[in-house]
Image: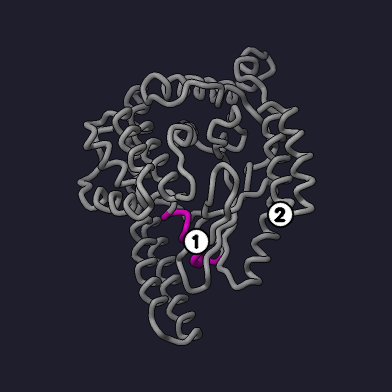
Amino acid sequence: MNLNSALRTVLTLGLCCLLASCYYVQATRGQIEVLSKREPIDEILESPNTEAELRRRLGLVQEARQFSIDELSLPDNRSYRAYSDLERDFVVWNVFAAPEFSLEAREWCYPVVGCVSYRGYFSEEAANREAGKLRQKGFDVAVGGVPAYSTLGNFNDPVLNTMMRWDDVKLVSTLFHELAHQVLYIKDDTAFNESFATAVEEIGIERWLAATDRPDDMAGYRAGKALHRGLVELVNAAKDDLADYYDRDIDADTMRELKSERLQQLASDVRKELRAAGRSENHWLTGEINNARLLPMSLYDGQVPAFLALYAECESDLGCLYEEAGKLSKLDREERSARLAALTAGYQGPGDG
């Protein structure tokens, strides 16, 4: 879609506000901002006015983009061939919500992508307003800034300045993650989509680090991944306990006390894990820890072992992984979940990348 088409869409959605919600207008305006600020990376690299560090990092993006095509069989298209400087820290802010005594994510449904477990806003203020409304309805709520997202190939997604806040490894791995969404994305299953993309990201970055001979970065990446897996285990253990509490026939005050104690214990466990790894406390520990704050880890990581197990069954053949994951996507949700659970149970550890 070009900018003229997008502008027509804005006008159409403006009329839709009379019948539904103005949410889609802000979303379209935000997307137009991202697209209108695109500059071809080739031109930026050729310009004598480009800062040295930006030049280096965009050059790295170009190399990684070609690697994604040649070695990872990711889409060869115009995505990530341009750069947009939005002059802010995040491109969107996602709102997550769950009932006070449930770990079931509140879902929002959209054209094309179906239902997802978050609602994204191009304005932090708008995201916080939505969060406030949900809190008034009794939901646990969390708001998080997002440096990158995928339009699933519907637009030529640019590299964003918000992605440049990361180190080289995270920048490249995010590129692989977002491109993986263009390979496979199904409606109404956020956990499947994000776990698949995370698995491709992990496989891709291991291959890229090996191919570019970055042993120090590889060691740092693997240590970080091990720490992250440990934190996910702590969160999952807390979620299991909370799910048990929420199933009990007890009064609300007692339930709140049990919930508060378990979440405080989780925060303490996370701090210990970070200190043991020599890491400082991260942003996850700031603000209230509640049901909604637990959701993103499950969505992005919950089914990753299943896809890594599938990759191992495919003898480290990414084309095979994409094909087999595609078959899973065609199953009904219950059957797909059972197959993913079986793969997870049989997973022996990291593949050879």
Q: Nearer the viewer, mark 2 or mark 1?
A: 1
Q: Do we see residue 271 in this rendering?
A: yes
Q: Which mark is residue 105?
A: 1
Spot occupied by residue 120 in the image (x, y as percentages of width and height): 61, 49
Q: Which residues are magenta?
A: 288-298
Q: Residue at x 55, y 68 (%)?
A: 140
Callouts 2 and 1 close, C-beta under 8 Å: no
- Quadrant of the frame with the N terminus: top right
> Does residue 217 belong to the magenta stretch?
no
Q: Residue at x 40, y 47 (%)?
A: 192
Locate residue 2: give its quadrant: top right
Please, what is the three-letter code of the amino acid marked with disc 2? Ala
Residue tagged 2:
126
Q: Residue at x 59, y 52 (%)?
A: 94
- Quadrant of the frame with the C terminus: top left
Tell me which numbered mark, 2 or 1, is placed earlier along the sequence.
1
Spot occupied by residue 324 in the image (x, y as percentages of width and height): 30, 36
Chief secondary structure of the magenta portion: helix
Q: CA distance from mark 2 to mark 1?
A: 20 Å
